Image (tube, helix red, strand yellow):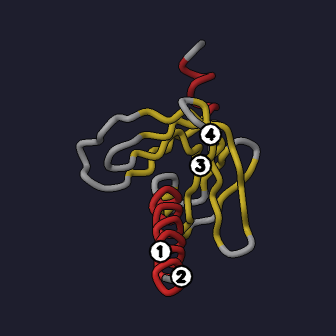
Amino acid sequence: MRRVQITCTLMASLLLVAMSVLAADKNTANVTISDAVTVGSSQLAPGDYKLSWEGAGPEVQVTFTRGKTSVTAPATITDQTNSYGRTAVIVKQENGSKVLTSIQLPKRQLILEGEQTQAGR
């Protein structure tokens, strides 16, 4: 009887760990930025970043992480699929520099706050 209790407890623990890993993956993505871009008031160098976001949506906080570098910015998330079938980084030229406006993931789109402010004018 004791062995059954231990086995059940172990299985329940493994199930909880697996569920938390799956839940965490829903709010992360990997993205490659090919040129230096501005995000909010910060500059991101070209490279591979881990993208993560927090919040229930549609308003979220997006964090770009690369090594020890971490930049956070407000964004809006939508359940919009893109026609690329893969992750796309959308930038625009503004005052001589490139500004990150959105990240299009296969099943979601993250629109950075600066772009919403521009669109609202």
Visible in this render: residue 79? yes
Mark 1–mark 3 Cα distance, whole angstroms, equals 34 Å
Visible in this render: residue 31? no
Mark 2–mark 3 Cα distance, whole angstroms, equals 37 Å
Q: Residues within 10 Å of mark 4 (few under 14, many from 20)?
A: few
Q: Is disc 1 in contact with disc 2, using a CB cutoff of under 8 Å?
A: yes
Q: Between 18 and 54, which is closer to the camera in this rendering? A: 18
Q: Which mark is residue 55?
A: 4
Q: Amino acid at mark 3?
A: Trp
Q: Between 98 and 61, which is closer to the camera in this rendering? A: 61
Q: Residues within 10 Å of mark 3 (few under 14, many from 20)?
A: many
Q: Residues within 10 Å of mark 1 (few under 14, many from 20)?
A: few
Q: Is disc 4 in contact with disc 3, using a CB cutoff of under 8 Å?
A: yes
Label 2, on which residue?
6
Residue at the (53%, 59%) spot, across then down: 24
Label 3, on which residue?
53
Q: Is tag 4's residue or tag 1's residue first in the polypeptide sequence?
A: 1
Q: Position of residue 60 (x, y in %)?
A: 61, 38
Residue at the (56%, 64%) spot, across then down: 50
Secondary structure of the residue carrying tag 2 is helix
Indicate whether 60 appears above or below 30. above
Label 1, on which residue?
8
**In the displayed structure image, the side of residue 26 where residue 120 appears, left or right:** right
Mark 1–mark 2 Cα distance, whole angstroms, equals 5 Å
Mark 4–mark 2 Cα distance, whole angstroms, equals 36 Å
Secondary structure of the residue carrying tag 4 is loop
Residue at the (47%, 61%) spot, across then down: 19
Q: Is tag 4's residue or tag 2's residue first in the polypeptide sequence?
A: 2
Q: Name the quadrant containing residue 61.
A: top right
Q: Amino acid at mark 1?
A: Cys
Q: Position of residue 87 (x, y in %)?
A: 37, 54
Secondary structure of the residue carrying tag 1 is helix
